[in-house]
């Protein structure tokens, strides 16, 4: 199977899984259900995914790829903070393409916090890519602190995004701006 065909299969499975999450809830959607919805045998699904968490990892990678492809080089002279703001807003805009499914998955995390914990390392990897896209270093201890901090920022603002029904994501934008300002203040105090 070519890499393009594998990519399409993964995208189809992610779409099928998110549709089932909306219809039944993420916890109630089985791998068998996902395989049937995607038009694959259970064995074919297993070739591409280890488990349902792996489907969420694939979704995260799809979102990462879209953000990284969409985000330009940025304005000349823009601060790293402004660049990070642009990158994260692009991520929330891309996430909007999957809003109902992602919201259903997030709702399931309230009943099964273990799934949220399992997702954290994958989210941290995504946040590392977002920092790179903003032109910020991610190596060493300072980089690890930045990744952890940005993961917290992203999750905090994600709550606002989930309830933001505005066409331009104005509530999300305001929450992100406010949260990044707080982090900027804290980073200055801590010497980061």
Image (cartoon, rainbow, N blue to C red):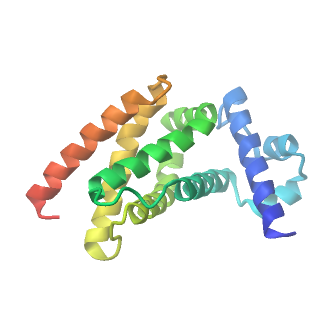
Q: Position of residue 143 (x, y in %)?
A: 31, 69
Q: Is residue 28 visible?
A: no
* Rendering quarter of residue 98: top right
| Quadrant assignment for the C terminus | bottom left
Q: Position of residue 132 (x, y in %)?
A: 41, 66
Q: Is residue 138 above or below residue 58?
A: below
The front one of 140 and 36 is 140
Q: Is residue 169 above or below residue 15?
A: above
The front one of 5 and 29 is 5
**Residue displayed at 59% across by 53% down:** 66
Q: Is residue 134 above or below residue 109?
A: below
**Residue displayed at 48% across by 41% down:** 92
* Rendering quarter of residue 161: top left
Left or right relative to 9: residue 72: left
Q: Position of residue 135 (x, y in %)?
A: 36, 66
- Figure label count: 0
Left or right relative to 91: residue 5: right
Give the residue furthest to the front: 76
Q: Is residue 90 visible?
A: yes
Left or right relative to 66: residue 142: left
Q: Position of residue 134 (x, y in %)?
A: 38, 60
* Rendering quarter of residue 49: bottom right
The front one of 186 and 91 is 91
Give the residue furthest to the bottom: 140
Give the residue furthest to the top: 165
**Residue displayed at 32% across by 32% down:** 174
| Quadrant assignment for the N terminus | bottom right
Left or right relative to 82: residue 39: right
């Amino acid at each position: 199977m070519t890499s393009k065909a594998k990519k399409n299969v993964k995208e189809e499975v992610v779409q099928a899984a998110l549709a089932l999450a909306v219809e039944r809830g993420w916890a109630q959607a089985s791998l068998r259900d996902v395989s049937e919805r995607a038009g694959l045998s259970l064995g074919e699904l297993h070739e591409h995914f280890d488990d349902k968490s792996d489907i969420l990892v694939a979704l995260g990678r799809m979102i990462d790829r879209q953000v990284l492809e969409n985000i330009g080089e940025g304005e000349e002279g823009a601060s790293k903070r402004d660049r990070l703001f642009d990158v994260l807003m692009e991520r929330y805009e891309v996430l909007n393409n999957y809003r109902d499914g992602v919201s259903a998955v997030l709702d399931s995390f309230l009943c099964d916090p273990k799934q949220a914990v399992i997702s954290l390392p994958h989210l941290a990897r995504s946040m590392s890519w977002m920092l790179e896209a903003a032109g910020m270093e991610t190596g060493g201890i300072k980089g690890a602190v930045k990744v952890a901090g940005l993961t917290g920022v992203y999750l905090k603002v994600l709550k606002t995004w989930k309830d933001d029904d505005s066409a331009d994501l104005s509530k999300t934008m305001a929450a992100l701006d406010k949260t990044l300002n707080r982090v900027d203040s804290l980073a200055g105090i801590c010497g980061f």
